[in-house]
Image (tube, grey):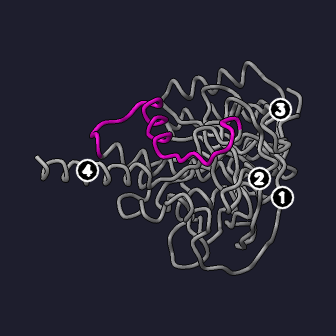
Amino acid sequence: MEQIVRLIPYQVNEVVEVVSEVPKGIEMIGAPIIWEKTKGKGITVAILDTGCDVSHPDLSEVIIGGRNFTHDDNGNPEVYIDYNGHGTHVAGTIAAVQNNNGVVGVAPEANLLILKVLDKDGSGQYDWILNGINYAVEQQVDIISMSLGGSRDLPELHQAIQNAIAHQILVVCAAGNEGDGQDSSDEFSYPASYNEVISVGAIDLERRSSNFSNSNNEVDLAAPGEEILSTYLNGRYAKLSGTSMATPHVSGALALIKDSVTKKFERNLTEPELYAQLIKRTVPLGNSPKLEGNGLLNLTVEAYLSDVFKEKLSAQVLKW
């Protein structure tokens, strides 16, 4: 197939050698509070991207394997090194380990399966994407994260995603960065615009909708996507901006949610049930649903509402 799939355009804001902090985006969605209950242990996230810096000190422990579907390194399937930086940055936001150095991801004990479907230039063939999705299904991953897209609505791509959903795999995609800041116009990117996909828009660290974030009626929720600090090439760190950076916040959050609710209900929840659990953990920001969907991801909302309900119930019992 024609090579027309590319990384969704993103901006590199800054590259640094040494950091030691919890990124602001991770704090904004409330992940550190949830770590008291779960850090995503045992949940596997497949990242379909440009590969990963597998020797990065914040990532090497959580990478359980990978595969190269591109022509990089002469097409060697066992070499899924990142020469671009995008995939490494996404990986860090999802699951950088908590080692009191560098950065930490949303789900620092989740497993990462690195599926390289875009080459060093950030380009890929649709066959590579399809093969990556199908491989993730074969490996029985829990979540597929894709910060990539194109303008072409390809039936084979849609079918591959539907197959993943049928296997109860959550599929999370970046909404796209072709937005004009207005909700009166629609910008569609695929696979994010498929109804079965969890489409993620971006906000800045002041909780304002990002001007570049695509608007359409398939956006499910928003997450931090500007000046996002995460892992980068050669053991370094970088701040990047784009819906590509918002997406891994949601993928990591789903790892925490799936681990937590599976323990709570003592059974495996279906993909629609897990999606409902995700949407319960959103807060409307007052933007158009075409920009923010159900609102900003906030992992503490469900717990907060539960506590409020308990307080009200206790007060009512005392009143009786």
Q: Quickly name the residue at label 2.
A: 242
User: Residues at badges 1 and 2 in contact (C-beta under 8 Å)?
Assistant: yes
Seen in the picture, residue 130 relative to 176 is either above or below; the reply is above
Q: Is residue 79 visible?
A: no
**In the rendering, at what x and y percent does residue 196 appear?**
60, 27
**Residue kind at label 3, given as amino acid type:** Ser
Q: State the separation of the CA atoms marked 1 and 4.
A: 46 Å
**Residue kind at label 4, given as amino acid type:** Lys
Helix or strand or loop: what does disc 1 sit on? strand
Which label was assigned to residue 11? 1
> In the rendered view, does 251 fall on the left or right side of 150?
left
Instruction: Say whether disc 2 or disc 3 marks the residue closer to the N-terminus.
Output: 3
Classed neighbour count for the residue bearing mark 1: other residues with Cα under 10 Å, few (<14), some (14–19), many (≥20): few
Seen in the picture, residue 247 relative to 17 is either above or below; the reply is above
* Res 124 quadrant in image: top right
Furthest residue toward front = 319
Instruction: Say whether disc 2 or disc 4 marks the residue closer to the N-terminus.
Output: 2
Q: State the separation of the CA atoms marked 2 and 3.
A: 19 Å
Q: Quickly name the residue at label 3.
A: 185
User: Residues at badges 2 and 4 in contact (C-beta under 8 Å)?
Assistant: no
Q: Quickly name the residue at label 4.
A: 312
Instruction: Say whether disc 3 or disc 1 marks the residue closer to the N-terminus.
Output: 1
